[in-house]
Image (cartoon, helix red, strand yellow):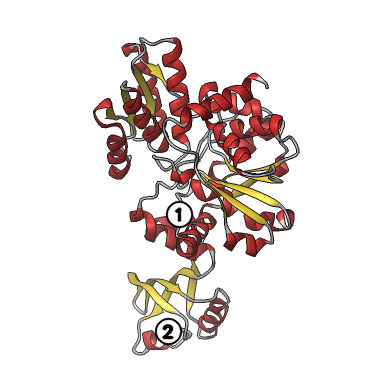
């Protein structure tokens, strides 16, 4: 057994003193849809509802084994890594200082404090993560504390590798394909490392958010690169630069095996898993399942494992998720309409709506001329094809309009 595989198995055994192996569940709904044996590795069911606890615990345990005097750990995180470290700090009875951006939702702050109790101190620094990270690392030097990286650390990678050890122990034979979410790369590096030695014929697909495709960028360049812009919606995986150590392990993967998941499509997957299966997934946690439609021709008749990496979803975001899902599915559109200022014009417009169309928003923006006014209108329907009939009716009636559904700047400002 290699040193990496041995370390991963050792980490797995140590974790059993903290929580049992997370379930590996066959999903009947997805298996029937794709004609495959689809299993979900439920990392959303750890004590902190994400796999991040594995790496944080493993790294902390090993630091203390080599340096028992180290009783102070620091991290910068606005989400799952913070909660995992807080939980581990309370378990080991050590001090933790967690730096979070000032803009972190109160719900995440409260959960981190709940998991850490009196063992952790939370410091809110910076509007953006890079300033938060700089403050955390600067504090480490001053306080003599140990910085705990969320993914760019060999012990963290080995801790995340325990996911693979459990999968192989839970299935009678190795799966044909494993679908992994990717952010900083720690989970992907750890899982592929174990399979490379224990089940080398297993294939992988790596899924990252379209607005944070740091693995694809690194694969194209041959080294980690920093993305100029990141869409933060998939907050558990929206990383501007994949970790150096994880990428060193992932460097040989083929570009065709990397899938970019559109943020709005992920919302459809989240809602389906919630409404059909009763499974609560955060955006990053839904990445592996979201890739299944793109892999339908590849997975038929095969055994597939999707790692659902986290379920820390704030239900206050549910309206936004529903909105994004409807727009991506073509069931909701926004228009700026040039409405004639004459009697009967509104009645004439309403008559254009079909029986399955519903007005979700109607707002006069301004009166642009004596005889016309600009109206923002949002319409929901039951079938995307209905919009073709609706816009045809507007054109036939000479109603001037502009579809702003996919105009990010306008939609963000007006909607």
Q: What percent of the width, then of the height, locates residue 285?
A: 50, 47
Residue 243 location (% of width, % of height): 55, 28
Residue 366 drawn at (x, y percent): 33, 69
- Give the secondary structure at mark 1: helix
Q: Which mark is residue 253?
A: none
- Dot 1 corresponds to which residue? 409
Disc 2 designates what residue? 349
Q: Which image quadrant is residue 380 in? A: bottom left
Q: Nearer the viewer, residue 142 or 47?
A: 47
Helix, strand or loop at mark 2: helix
Q: Is residue 47 visible?
A: yes
Q: How many marks?
A: 2
Image quadrant in which you'd find residue 225? top right
Name the residue nearer the viewer: 229 or 35. Answer: 35
Q: Residue at x 46, y 35 (%)?
A: 52
Q: Nearer the viewer, residue 272 or 222?
A: 272
On the image, which quarter does residue 90 sit in?
top left
Residue 199 pos. (x, y %)? 71, 36
Relative placement, left or right, of 166 versus 97 is right
């Amino acid at each position: 057994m290699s040193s990496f595989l041995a370390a991963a198995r050792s980490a797995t055994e140590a974790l059993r003193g903290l929580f049992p192996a997370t379930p590996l569940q066959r999903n009947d709904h997805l298996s029937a849809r794709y004609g495959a044996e689809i299993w979900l590795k439920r990392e959303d069911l750890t004590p902190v509802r994400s796999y991040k606890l594995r790496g944080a615990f493993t790294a902390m345990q090993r630091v203390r084994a080599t340096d028992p005097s180290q009783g102070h750990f620091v991290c910068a995180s606005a989400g799952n890594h913070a909660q995992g470290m807080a939980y581990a700090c309370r378990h080991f009875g050590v001090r933790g200082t967690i730096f979070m951006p000032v803009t972190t939702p109160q719900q995440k702050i409260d959960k981190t404090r709940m998991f850490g109790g009196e063992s952790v101190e939370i410091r809110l620094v910076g509007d953006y993560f890079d300033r938060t990270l700089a403050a955390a690392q600067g504090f480490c030097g001053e306080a003599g504390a140990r910085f705990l990286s969320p993914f760019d650390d060999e012990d963290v990678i080995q801790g995340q590798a325990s996911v693979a050890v459990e999968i192989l122990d839970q299935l009678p034979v190795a799966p044909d394909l494993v679908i992994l979410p990717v952010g900083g790369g720690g989970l992907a590096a750890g899982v592929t490392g174990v399979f490379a030695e224990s089940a080398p014929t297993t294939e992988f697909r790596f899924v990252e958010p379209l607005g944070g495709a740091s693995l694809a960028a690194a694969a194209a360049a041959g080294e980690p690169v920093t993305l100029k812009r990141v869409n933060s919606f998939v907050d558990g995986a929206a990383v501007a630069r994949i970790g150096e150590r994880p990428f060193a392990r992932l460097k040989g993967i083929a570009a065709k095996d990397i899938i970019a998941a559109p943020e709005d499509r992920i919302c459809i997957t989240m809602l389906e898993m919630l409404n059909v299966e009763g499974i609560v997934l955060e955006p990053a946690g839904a990445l592996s399942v979201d890739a299944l439609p793109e892999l339908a021709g590849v997975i038929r008749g095969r055994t597939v494992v999707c790692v659902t990496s986290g379920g820390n979803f704030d239900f206050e975001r549910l309206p936004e998720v529903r909105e994004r899902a409807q727009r991506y599915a073509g069931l909701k559109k926004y228009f700026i309409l040039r409405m004639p200022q004459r009697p009967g014009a509104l009645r004439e417009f309403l008559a254009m709506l079909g029986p399955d169309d519903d007005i979700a928003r109607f707002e006069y923006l301004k009166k642009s001329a004596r005889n016309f006014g600009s109206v923002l209108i949002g319409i929901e329907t039951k079938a995307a094809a209905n919009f073709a009939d609706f816009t045809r009716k507007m054109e036939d009636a000479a109603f001037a309009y502009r579809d702003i559904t996919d105009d990010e700047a306008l939609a963000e400002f007006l909607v």
